[in-house]
Image: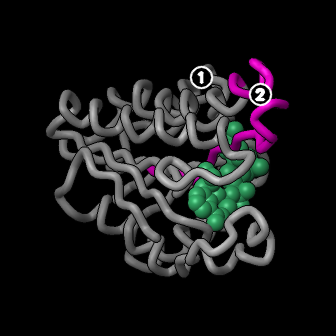
Amino acid sequence: MKILLVGATGRLGAALFAALAQRGHHVLGASREHSDHHVDISNCATIAALYERIGPVDAVICAAGSTPYKPLHQLTHDDYLTGFHNKALGQIDLVRLGLPSIAPRGSFTLTTGVLAREPVVTSAAASAANGAVESFVRAAALEAAPVRVNAVSPTVVTEALEQYADFFPGIEPVPLERVVQAYIRSIEGAETGRVFALG
Ligand SMILES: NC(=O)c1ccc[n+]([C@@H]2O[C@H](COP(=O)([O-])OP(=O)(O)OC[C@H]3O[C@@H](n4cnc5c(N)ncnc54)[C@H](OP(=O)(O)O)[C@@H]3O)[C@@H](O)[C@H]2O)c1
């Protein structure tokens, strides 16, 4: 399959790139700076230009998206807007603008996270953005068929625990390898409208 992977240089994205290439897929890596293809998912003009440049694809994965973390009483309107643009609307636009480019039985696989279902202190903006993406996935799948739309929603990955352990006290991490398998299930399987929750 020809697969567009946005966020290809990140912790999840780099592992995905390697695993998908090893399975024989032709992976086009994209991100804002250090990938072969440049895109900023918070800027929909760059998404449209990317699809125009790469032509038809069999699958699109987004392993990018960030949100601010702050105590509830410090979160501003702009913080919520930033989180929504970078995590929710960016991924929604990848689907919206990608529909004309995706193969008839192709798939979109977005990335959310445990904070949609298990919030922690300072996660209000992140939880809201992740929850929006999961609701979008379920709704979009109804109308996109036979194109499929799923999300992978991991808890903190074991390999990132050192960086994030303080944010997730007592929350069990998930090995990156298990997370990668969920994307493979989404891309190579037949399911749609699913949020694959890990951890
Ligand atoms: N790590 C975890 O434990 C974990 C757990 C659950 C969920 N997640 C979610 O999984 C996703 C990836 O996490 P990660 O840890 O792999 O992140 P990461 O290491 O920070 O990598 C992010 C990747 O996305 C790209 N990127 C960032 N903003 C972008 C934008 N606006 N447009 C296009 N590309 C962009 C980055 O490259 P450039 O900087 O070059 O653009 C990079 O390739 C995030 O949505 C994160 O919330 C992560």
> Where's residue 169, x and y in %?
69, 70
For the question of whether residue 192 can be seen, the reply is yes
Q: Is residue 139 above or below residue 1?
A: above
Q: Position of residue 136 (x, y in %)?
A: 37, 32
| Residue 44 numbered tag | 1
> Which region shows up in magenta?
61-81
Q: Is residue 62 magenta?
A: yes
Q: Is residue 131 above or below residue 28?
A: above
Mark 2 → mark 1, Cα distance in angstroms = 19 Å
Q: Residue at x 81, y 41 (%)?
A: 70
Q: Is mark 1 within 8 Å of ligand 1?
A: no
Image spot of residue 47 (x, y percent)? 57, 29
Which type of secondary structure does the marked residue at label 1 adopt? Answer: helix
41 and 33: which is toward the camera: 41
Image quarter where the N terminus lies is: bottom left
Nearer the observer, 152 or 121: 121
Which of the 4 image quarters holds residue 198? bottom left
